[in-house]
Amino acid sequence: MQQPSGGARVTDLVQAVLDAADRTPAASALTARGRTWTYAELARRIRATAAGLRAEGLEHGDRVLFSVRPGPDAVVLALGIVGVGGTVVFADPGAGEALFRARAALAAPRWVAAESLLYLASSAPLRPIARTRGLELAPYAKLVPDARHIRAGGWLPGVPSGAMSLARLATTNGDGIIEAGPADQALVVFTSGTTDAPKAVVHTRGSLGAGLADFAAGVGIRPGLRVLTDQLMVGIPALIGGAHWTMPAPGLDPGARPAAYLEHLGDAELLFAAPATLDAILAALDTRPALTPALETIVLGGAPVLPPLLRRAFARFPRASIRAVYGMTEILPVAIADGAEKLAAPGEGDFVGRLVPSVTARVDDGELVLGGPGLALGHLAELPAHPLEELRTGDLATIDGGRLVLRGRAKDMFIRGTQNVYPGLYEPVIAALPGVADAAMAGVPDAIGDDRIVVAVVPAADPPAGPTTAHPLVAEVARRLPGLIDAGVLPDAVVALPALPRAGRGRKLDRAELARLVAPFVDAARAGERA
């Protein structure tokens, strides 16, 4: 049975931000790198950037390969692109050159927007240096033939001649925002895949607007609320709700630099974090409790939120409300759970909250199937022939009065950080490497709900007597993987086995047994990290 969770609404995300600016022009909108922009200033830059892009020839439907780090420039440029009718194609330069090229070829952008430092680092003289630091950068200046280029930052060697300056675009006179329909494409996000078959989700202005408005309402965004996050897909709902969005310094990681990150918490009232990030923050606060901020709300998303982390969070922040967001790239959010209610939820399964208003859900043969105005248009390689009518999530679930409980997974999938990892996408590629007779991936859960990823390989020659990391094939596979698969799914360990464990008459891979076999090597890797 189809179960809508309430009255769906569709919001244009760009117009929603501009409307918030019109309501409170003098209020603080965005703080980053020691400077604060008011809503009036932010709206002026967005409108001016859109006008500059139109004057330079960006047309409705043009795609822009986008590699600008989260910051004011990224916010202004992304909203300006969408506001003028273009589509932002988020591109992670750390994905590796081969995969980056494949993604660019699939997206077929007419424009490239990148930071000046990326143009410099990916230029011929410096690419070998970047490679020694583990970065296989594609040459941005030449990656897309005949592309128009936008640079964020001052001119540096490697920036293409004729590349327009984002700073100059933002000073254009006029308002370039065009009226657009909810079905207009706005965002392409690559989720997984290989160099042969990259996978990307395409969102429209309507699908993004519906989801982001639901997020803002569901986590309690209000005018003036001080929100700390570096995530555009969280910060933009904050702007829609009239909040004051603060960005931490680029690259600031609470796990690597806990003391510096704690200083950023300051007067934040709402913090958005992945479970692994909150885990690092809580560990840092255990050693410096005096820096505990007076948070009103903690929003967790991107991975399962398990009871041990919730209990630690409530112990450190007893007065805070905790919201756990369940969603996926194709439709975000799906449901939002109150942390206290989640801890008290009876029975088996993972209570992930109540469905948000723009989502419809049904259960088909135990599997959760989603739809509604927040659903993405489809997967890039399958459009326009096969748009998404609904999304089969692969999650087993029950729905009772809009309350969603997950019961497990209908298909193989691991979760690391904010990324869903489907091993079936990667195992054939790994198994095709020279010297590999068979290969599989295993997920070994850690204490906060993330999966540690292990690649198990069966050598074609001289297979070991038992699981080991000492076989020479292990180092070779580890060396080859960064150029073949997503950076986000690179394994925590590679282990050689005499054979993969299989069960049943069909000799199907026994992933549970595989995880048991390789778990000691994850423990060893953790010990090495601590050392």
Image (tube, rainbow, N blue to C red):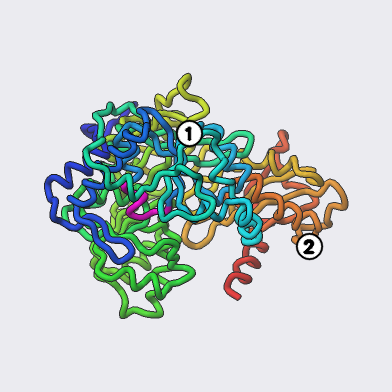
The three-letter amino acid code for the residue at tag 2 is: Ala
Q: Residue at x 35, y 47 (%)?
A: 233
Within-10-Å neighbours for mark 2: few <14, some 14–19, many 20+: few
Most foreground residue, 317 or 477: 477
The residue where tag 1 is placed is 109
Within-10-Å neighbours for mark 1: few <14, some 14–19, many 20+: many
The residue where tag 2 is placed is 470
Q: Residue at x 30, y 54 (%)?
A: 323
Q: Which residues are magenta?
A: 69-76
Q: Residue at x 34, y 28 (%)?
A: 184
Which x, y percent locates residue 230? 37, 56
Q: Is residue 368 visible?
A: yes
Which mark is in front, 2 or 1?
Answer: 1
Q: Is residue 487 left or right of residue 23?
A: right
Most foreground residue, 25 or 246: 25
Which x, y percent locates residue 205? 31, 33
Q: Quick one: SS at disc 1?
A: loop
Furthest-front residue in this view: 161
Furthest-right residue in this view: 462
Q: Is residue 479 left or right of residue 171?
A: right
